[in-house]
Amino acid sequence: MSNQLELTLSTSAELSHGAVGVAVDRLIRQAVRDCIDRPSDKRPRTVTLGLFITPTPRIEGQSVTCEGAKGVAKAKLKIPDYETSEIDFGVRNNGSAVFAPHSPENHMQVSFLDDEDNE
């Protein structure tokens, strides 16, 4: 009786003592949490499992055969970058930029809230 498993999609979760399956499950949960946090962002969240398999050659004289293979599994998550709507900046000659926190679309907008805060 052999304790070896054939490498397939369904057995790949057991690689590295099950760490690959745990990692993919964790990334799926992170992707779903990001959907919950940003439901209006319709861009996809992508969970990727990559298996990188490299041959182990055996060289005997002029003959090269495949003795086996080595592999690395990589799991990654791509979520959309966080992005604001366009912000209007004023520029100063000294190289600084200014903005109006209460009116991101117009850096010159005066806010009455500032006057009330100073009273």
Image: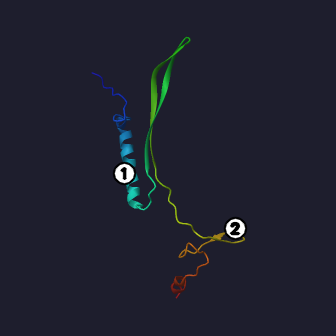
The residue drawn where x is 53% and y is 66% is 85
* Residue 25, position as x, y percentages in the image: 36, 46
Query: Mark 1 — residue?
Result: 29
Looking at the image, tell me whether mark 1 or mark 2 is earlier in sequence order. Answer: 1
Displayed quadrant of residue 73: top left
Q: Residue furthest front?
A: 42
* Residue 115, position as x, y percentages in the image: 54, 86
* Colour basis: rainbow
Q: CA distance from mark 1 to mark 2?
A: 43 Å
Amino acid identity at mark 1:
Arg
Query: Mark 2 — residue?
Result: 95
Q: Residue furthest bottom?
A: 119
* Residue 46, position as x, y percentages in the image: 44, 48
Tell me if residue 106 comes above or below residue 112 in the rendering: above
Amino acid identity at mark 2:
Gly
Tell me if residue 65 comes above or below residue 12 in the rendering: above
Q: Nearer the viewer, residue 108 or 71?
A: 108
